[in-house]
Amino acid sequence: QVQLVESGGGSVQAGGSLRLSCAASGYTNGRYFMGWFRQAPGKEREWVATMTSVGTAGYADSVKGRCTISQDNAKNTLYLEMNSLKPEDSAMYYCAAGVAGDKFRYWGQGIQVTVSS
């Protein structure tokens, strides 16, 4: 069973930076893709960024140019570097993973990011 554990969230002032980490375990044979989502109170879950199984990154327009997704395959860890944070970036951030060709099936418990103005 794949398990994902997020870390690195917290509170920061607008314009600041945070780096989220997602440690993955339980991978079996197969190629996985991973990504980040977020959900603010009263809003639907929003896709933030994806790293494909071949290392291609994709970003939502709302974070493009401010966020960088990366991964350390040796550590089975996914990162999300967030810069120039805005109050509207405040949300619970979730790490997710799936087998290549399938959908996101595995989710972390989420970690809070709060950006104050």
Image (cartoon, helix red, strand yellow):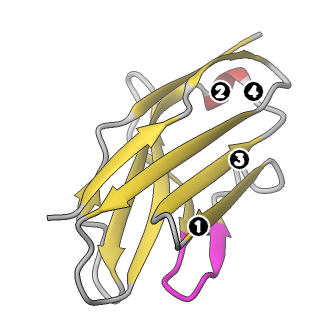
Task: Give the Cα distance between marks 3 and 2.
Answer: 16 Å
The residue carrying mark 2 is 88
Range covered by the magenta-colored residues:
51-58
Q: Position of residue 61 (x, y in %)?
A: 70, 56
Which mark is drawn over residue 112?
Answer: none
Q: Are marks 2 and 1 in contact (CB under 8 Å)?
A: no
Residue in the picture at 31% in, 46% down: 108
- Image quarter of residue 88: top right
Q: Residue 22 at x, y = what percent?
A: 46, 50
Q: Amino acid at mark 3?
A: Glu
User: Tag 1: residue type?
Assistant: Asp
Callout 3: few (<14), some (14-19), or many (20+) C-alpha neighbours within 10 Å? some
What's the CA distance linking mark 2 and mark 4?
A: 5 Å
Q: Position of residue 70 (x, y in %)?
A: 65, 64
Q: Label 1's element?
A: strand
First in sequence: mark 2 vs mark 1: 1
Residue identified by numbered label 1:
72
SS state under label 4: loop
Contact, mark 2 vs mark 4 (Cβ under 8 Å): yes
Residue at the spot of label 4: 86
> Label 3, label 1: how many angstroms apart (C-alpha)?
13 Å
Q: CA distance from mark 3 to mark 4?
A: 14 Å
Q: Residues within 10 Å of mark 2 (few under 14, many from 20)?
A: few
Q: Residue 26: horizontal and vertical position, in percent?
A: 23, 66
The amino acid type, in three-letter code, at marker 2 is Glu
Q: Which residue is mark 3?
A: 81
